Amino acid sequence: MDGASIYATNANVPEVQGRLGNVVGITEPPAIEARGITKRFGHVEAVRGVDCVVHAGEVVALVGDNGAGKSTVLSIICGALAPDTGEVHIFGEALWPPSVHRAKQLGLEMAYQDLALAPDLSVLENVFMGNELLRKGWIGKFGWLDRKSMAARADTDIRRLGVSLPSMQLPIFELSGGQRQVVAIARAAMWAKRAILLDEPTAALGVKQSGLVGEIIRASADDGLAVLVVSHDVERILKLADRVVVLRQGSVVMETATSSLTLEVVVRAMLGGGKESEM
Ligand SMILES: Nc1ncnc2c1ncn2[C@@H]1O[C@H](COP(=O)(O)OP(=O)(O)OP(=O)(O)O)[C@@H](O)[C@H]1O
Ligand SMILES: [Mg+2]
């Protein structure tokens, strides 16, 4: 595909004031652009020629049955896994060689759910892990953490996301599974400058917390982030997302706006049979 046609769909995206203060318009490349991604694990062709594009300010749902290749696509986009073929660009920058660190530098964060939280550390310490604020001046040179600024910043940011926790000082192991998941998602949303990837963010959550995660996702997109979210809760995700990409056996079988899309059409595309492609 040539350079001009790659960005053609961007013309439909309204101008968005991004977090970095940039106005994202038709001249901006997509926040996330994965093209022709394939990935094989031994005899399993997990991902076959997948294209996945997410613009700033947009929520895209990636859905499909178990084993369809969703997590593999996310791992490739966040730099954790190398594709066999294909390319990932983040705001026009090639993510090559694949590197989670590089993806973070380019503004992309992935929420790994509670697996990536340190259970013995507090909510606050977890939120700031790897992003600790050091005290200004000579004392900072010795690596002293500025706990007061960290607490204030975390409190403000987490409140802004609408998350209420008993205390930021509680160790993670004292939180419920759902609360941990919310912390992991809030952490990713807090640090992501341009794009955020969420794999099954509501899998272990009750109704209230699922609603909260939905609000974090919407608020993040309204703030100018590109959001790519994998979910089995197709009904809920269709209401939340602007666009849906359906994977079946590693291939994209549908990619369309969610407005005027019914659950039945998506489920049929996920499972196969009938008219399935609206690409
Ligand atoms: N590290 C791996 N080694 C071998 N096979 C793998 C590996 N990761 C994924 N696969 C295989 O690739 C295919 C796609 O897996 P993937 O985890 O991407 O699916 P998924 O859509 O996320 O499924 P689920 O909804 O169950 O999470 C599956 O057949 C899976 O068994
Ligand atoms: Mg998965």
Image (tube, rainbow, N blue to C red):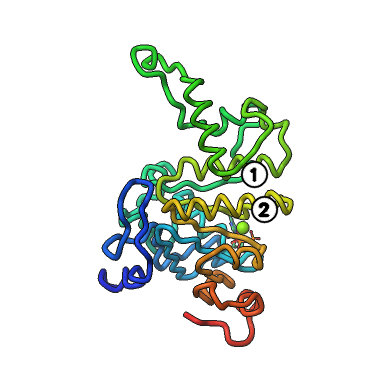
Q: Nearer the viewer, mark 1 or mark 2?
A: 2
How packed is label 2: few (under 14 Cα within 10 Å), some, or many (20 or more)?
A: some
Which residue is drawn at the image coordinates 39% and 64% (left, top)? 86
Residue 256 coordinates in the image, percent (x, y): 50, 75
Which residue is drawn at the image coordinates 47% and 19% (left, top)? 145
The extreme bottom residue here reads: 274
Label 1 with label 2: CB-CB less than 8 Å: no
User: According to the image, label 2 marks what residue?
Assistant: 210
Which mark is drawn over residue 120?
A: none
Which residue is drawn at the image coordinates 51% and 51% (left, top)? 219
Which residue is drawn at the image coordinates 38% and 44% (left, top)? 102
Tell me if residue 185 comes above or below residue 170 in the rendering: below
Tell me if residue 197 comes above or below residue 240 in the rendering: above
Residue 177 coordinates in the image, percent (x, y): 71, 42
**Of the residues shown, which amino acid type is indicated by label 2?**
Ser
User: How many numbered discs, if any?
Assistant: 2
User: According to the image, label 1 marks what residue?
Assistant: 181
Give the SS element for disc 2.
helix
**Of the residues shown, which amino acid type is indicated by label 1?**
Gln
Residue 167 coordinates in the image, percent (x, y): 66, 29
Upstream in sequence: badge 1 or badge 2: 1
Give the SS element for disc 1.
helix
How packed is label 1: few (under 14 Cα within 10 Å), some, or many (20 or more)?
A: many
Whole-number angstrom distance, CA of label 1 to CA of label 2: 10 Å
Residue 14 is left or right of residue 214, and the answer is: left
Quadrant assignment, res 236: bottom right
Question: The N terminus lies in which quarter of the figure?
Answer: bottom left
Residue 118 is left or right of residue 109, and the answer is: right
Q: Quadrant of ligand 2?
A: bottom right
